[in-house]
Image (spheres, grey):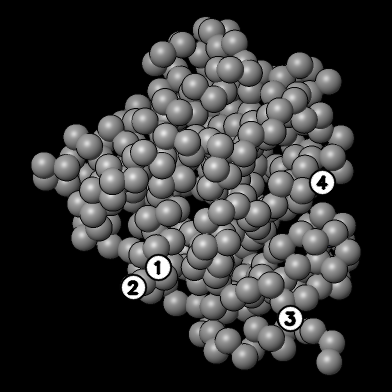
């Protein structure tokens, strides 16, 4: 029998308020697909089961059918970015804040290898959330910072220093040839129209400018370990799951020149190891205040292995593209 994603999603017993829409492959436009896996929102524990298919023509794995963009908002409440906000974790607070700042420092280390950042550098972060990465760069280099995102309840210190665009990236009235660097940290796998976003990035970048994309890597060790409980599956927010081949295919389709491909990112792979193990053992719904102590304890125990994290293809990938 021919695989039909519309029939398949009905078997999953979702709330009747979900109105699914069927889409074609983001990369090649084909409608031919086969079942890949069923994913849930393991991180927040929200209800819903979502179907990922694999394109029969180009092998891209994407969510089909998906919730329309107007209905995805309930999955992006403040809880989703809660881990970025300041909170009191008792005696672990300094450790927690160090980990959060470290993430921004790792992003800085990564981008400053490819772009010389000074007071004249124009940087746009697509999916900037509360903007801590941009503010870190601005403080260190005095560079010019812009960000795009959907507005959450964003009362974050210094957020007004960011030239902020609210809404969909490709609908923003952004000046062409303006930016030296466009970053997409864990934005691309959420994108409802990755083709439009790549074209928009090309348009707003200067000749010689760089586009840096970090996404979870489907053909990684943590996916092999956790499968549908892999934290990178997070559904319905993650609209597509990219292997190395799939992301490079997408960039090639838009004539983006890849300067370098990295089998790691700024995001700590340990987060995927810990949460994937947790979802496998205890099911969905991660309570940060309950797990914060074991989180840091196991990180300490795993630290000898994590020394080699960049060589192990654990969970992430980063692609640096240069605009000609
Ligand atoms: Zn395809």
Is 39 situated above or below 97? Answer: below
Q: Earlier in the sequence, mark 1 or mark 4?
A: 4
Q: Earlier in the sequence, mark 3 or mark 4?
A: 3
Is 228 situated above or below 255? Answer: below
Secondary structure under the numbered disc 4 in the rendered image: helix
Question: Could you tell me residue 195's position as x and y percent?
Answer: 78, 47
Report the residue marked by disc 3.
5
Mark 3 and mark 2: span between their CA atoms? 29 Å
Mark 3 and mark 4: span between their CA atoms? 24 Å
Q: Residue at x 83, y 20 (%)?
A: 324
Q: Residue at x 64, y 34 (%)?
A: 262
Disc 4 crowd rating (10 Å Cα; few below 14, some 14-19, many 20+) is some
Question: Could you tell me residue 133's position as x and y percent?
Answer: 44, 29
Report the residue marked by disc 4.
249
Circles 1 and 2: CB atoms closer than 8 Å: yes
Report the residue marked by disc 1.
279
């Amino acid at each position: 029998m021919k695989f039909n994603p519309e029939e398949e999603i009905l078997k999953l017993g979702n709330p009747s308020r979900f109105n699914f829409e069927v889409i074609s492959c983001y990369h090649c436009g084909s409608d031919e697909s086969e079942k890949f896996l069923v994913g849930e929102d393991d991180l927040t524990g929200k209800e819903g089961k979502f179907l990922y298919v694999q394109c029969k023509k180009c092998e891209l794995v994407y969510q089909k059918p998906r919730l329309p963009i107007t209905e995805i908002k309930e999955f992006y409440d403040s809880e989703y970015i809660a881990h970025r906000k300041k909170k009191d974790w008792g005696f672990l607070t300094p450790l927690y804040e160090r980990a959060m700042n470290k993430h921004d420092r790792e992003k800085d280390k990564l981008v400053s290898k490819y772009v010389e950042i000074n007071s004249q550098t124009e940087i746009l972060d697509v999916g900037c959330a509360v903007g801590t990465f941009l503010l870190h760069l601005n403080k260190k280099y005095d560079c010019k910072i812009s960000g795009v995102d959907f507005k959450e309840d964003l009362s974050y210190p210094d957020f007004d220093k960011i030239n902020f665009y609210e809404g969909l990236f490709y609908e923003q009235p952004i000046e062409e040839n303006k930016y030296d660097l466009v970053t997409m940290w864990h934005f691309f796998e959420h994108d409802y129209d990755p083709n439009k976003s790549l074209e928009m990035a090309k348009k707003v970048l200067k000749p010689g400018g760089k586009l840096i994309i970090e996404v979870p890597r489907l053909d990684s060790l943590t996916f092999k370990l956790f499968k549908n409980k892999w934290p990178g599956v997070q559904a319905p927010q993650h609209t597509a799951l990219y292997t190395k081949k799939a992301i490079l295919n997408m960039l090639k389709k838009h004539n983006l020149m890849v300067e370098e491909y990295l089998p790691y990112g700024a995001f700590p792979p340990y987060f995927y190891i810990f949460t994937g193990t947790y979802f496998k053992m205890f099911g969905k719904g991660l309570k940060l205040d309950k797990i914060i102590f074991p989180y840091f304890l196991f990180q300490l125990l795993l630290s000898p292995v994590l020394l080699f994290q960049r060589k192990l293809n654990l969970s992430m990938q980063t692609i640096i593209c240069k605009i000609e």
